[in-house]
Image (cartoon, helix red, strand yellow):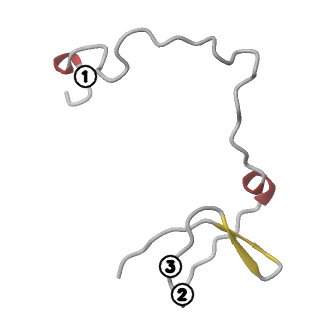
Amino acid sequence: MSLKSYEAIYDHGQMRWLGDSPQVEEARVIVTILSELSAIATSVKHQPSTRIAGKGKIIGDIISPAAPIEEWNCAK
């Protein structure tokens, strides 16, 4: 058995999926009730101000790290 998570809003007996919906005909579900639904239901991707659009510049390589891997301190 594998577990997968899906987000949905239950409203008046109907499920509204917030992303991908499960591809099953029948399933057993566990429901978690969040007290502040309004913050989740109204989440909107924010857009930057039009006043700054086109003013950014990429300088240098954005793929390679700025410091050599030997200098990284994460595994020490």
Q: What's the residue at 76%, 62% (across, down)? A: 35
Q: Secondary structure at mark 3?
A: loop
Q: Nearer the viewer, mark 1 or mark 2?
A: 2
Q: CA distance from mark 1 to mark 3?
A: 43 Å
Residue that carries the numbered disc 3 in the rendered image: 23
User: Local crowd at mark 3 within 10 Å, few (<14), some, or many (≥20)?
Assistant: few
In the rendered image, residue 69, in percent from the top left (x then y), is placed at 20, 21
- Cβ atoms under marks 3 and 2 closer than 8 Å: no
Q: Secondary structure at mark 1?
A: loop
Mark 2 belongs to which amino acid? Answer: Arg
- Cβ atoms under marks 1 and 2 closer than 8 Å: no
Q: Is residue 58 above or below residue 15?
A: above
Mark 1 belongs to which amino acid? Answer: Asn
Q: CA distance from mark 1 to mark 2?
A: 45 Å
Residue that carries the numbered disc 1 in the rendered image: 73
Disc number for residue 28: 2
Q: What's the residue at 47%, 13% (across, down)? A: 58
User: Local crowd at mark 2 within 10 Å, few (<14), some, or many (≥20)?
Assistant: few
Front-most of residues 35 and 14? 14
In the rendered image, residue 60, in percent from the top left (x then y), is placed at 37, 10
Q: What's the residue at 37%, 20% (across, down)? A: 62
